[in-house]
Amino acid sequence: MSRRVSILGATGSIGQNTIDLIARAPQDYEVVALTGARNIAQLAADARRLNARLAVTACDDLLDDLRAALDGSGIEVAAGAAAIIETAQRPADWIMSAIVGAAGLAPGMAALEQGTTLALANKESLVCAGPLLLATAQQHGATILPVDSEHSAIFQALVGEDVASVERIIITASGGAFRDWPLDDLVNATLAQASQHPNWDMGQRITIDSASMFNKAMEVIETHEFFGISPDGIEVLVHPQSMVHALVGFHDGALMAHVGPPDMRHAIGYALNHPNRGMLPVERLDLAAIGRLDFAAPDSRRWPALDLARRTMTRGGLAGAVFNAAKETALDGFINGQLKFTQMADIVAETLDRMDHAGGHIDAKMTLDNVLQTDHLARRAAQAAIDRRAG
Ligand code: NAD
Ligand code: MG
């Protein structure tokens, strides 16, 4: 029997890898909907190829372009943020959440409310609203399967284990583009330099977040929220080869490592085939040829984002929503040339400070409305901090 699937963020790096897997066995899937944003040509081509019922762009101004691109196909079209949420409400057995940024939160929530299986690549939603996401899944009988490579690795290492016997979790980081740069040069890092990843081929935003370690900082919070591990039990290890994705340490001293090539189709495919293991078209590692795997402790002067993640977890409440919004705004500031690479962490730290003194937003009850409101206020505070520096 074929399974009904939808892909939110189908035109991005994770979305395209998901489509690659689905297109290899089209008879197994009935594609309900694909969503994208500005890349209408890709969205339309994939909707036709996969025979999707619905194609949606996040951009209202591109509805006519999408309609024209799908003319005569019989595929339904829609546009706008509300249409993306409605798409997530369309009955499907498996939904990929691969929109980038906090924009993925409301659609992910809508998907959980229909009791589906949500393959969660959108780490921002766990950082902003982890407890809300988990409670919503539980309330509606939905399942969340992690798709971040580290979290898929942890999830797999925990099969058949009791989380209560976990002592620590180690997630690895490649170190990104600037791992070996002299510290003093970081302040002059350019956008082009920060957009190159040594091992993974990903969207631009997460690639820059890898260079700044904000991606790993988000993943530490993601680990805390999703697996319920205390901040003290989560470690980051720099591992330049990106082959050991995570290690789970149990209280008998055993460390279970997940090893595989840096190819997101593994984590996506695991979530797609769960609870089974399907055949996946990923490289089989030849460890003798690889010869060695290296590990080192991260330097917090090079990557202050890691300490900001600890501070965010310790603060709790809606601090994660502030952290994420400030990080996204600072990243925009770096991309559009308002900020230097090293100033992104300063903006996040300053925004956490200010929001802590701004009317109790961080301590507000965790509802979707409050998270979105805090996200909005934190973006404004972060942008004001950026403008103060520029002015
Ligand atoms: P990407 O930039 O390549 O793609 C993002 C997708 O989101 C695109 O389909 C885009 O059209 C859509 N989108 C952008 N803004 C939107 C908006 N406002 N509303 C609705 N849709 C919007 O990003 P990516 O690298 O595929 O990452 C997607 C998510 O997966 C992120 O949360 C990222 O952190 C996470 N992730 C990615 C990787 C990876 O290898 N790329 C690995 C782990 C986790
Ligand atoms: Mg990851």
Image (cartoon, rainbow, N blue to C red):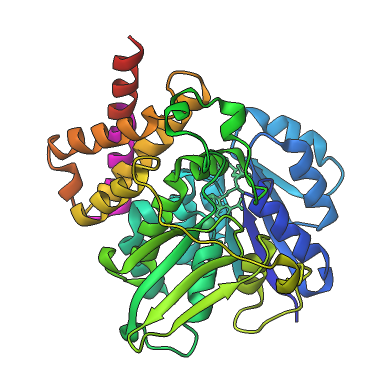
Tell me: 169 left or right of 80: left
Q: Above or below — where is 367 with respect to 178?
A: below
x and y, in percent, of residue 214 in the image: 42, 45
x and y, in percent, of residue 270 in the image: 63, 73
- Please name the residue shown 57% across and 27% down the image: 191
Residue situated in front as seen by the camera: 348 or 365: 348
Q: Which residue appears farthest toward the right when viewing the image?
A: 72
x and y, in percent, of residue 10 in the image: 67, 50
Q: Which residues are magenta?
A: 366-380
Q: Above or below — where is 266 with respect to 322?
A: below
- Please name the residue shown 38% across and 47% down the image: 299
x and y, in percent, of residue 169 in the image: 39, 71
Q: Is residue 360 magenta?
A: no
For the image shown, how many numbered marks are present on the structure? 0
Look at the image and tell me whether residue 91 can be seen.
no
Q: Which residue appears farthest toward the top when viewing the image?
A: 391
Tell me: 167 left or right of 285: left
Residue situated in front as seen by the camera: 41 or 30: 41
In what quadrant of the picture does the N terminus appear?
A: bottom right
Look at the image and tell me whether residue 296 can be seen.
yes
Quarter holding residue 68 = top right
Tell me: 325 left or right of 286: left
In what quadrant of the picture does the C terminus appear?
A: top left
Quarter holding residue 267 = bottom right
Q: Above or below — where is 327 with respect to 314?
A: above
- Please name the residue shown 34% across and 21% down the image: 386
Magenta span: helix, strand or loop, mainly?
helix
Quarter holding residue 134 = bottom left
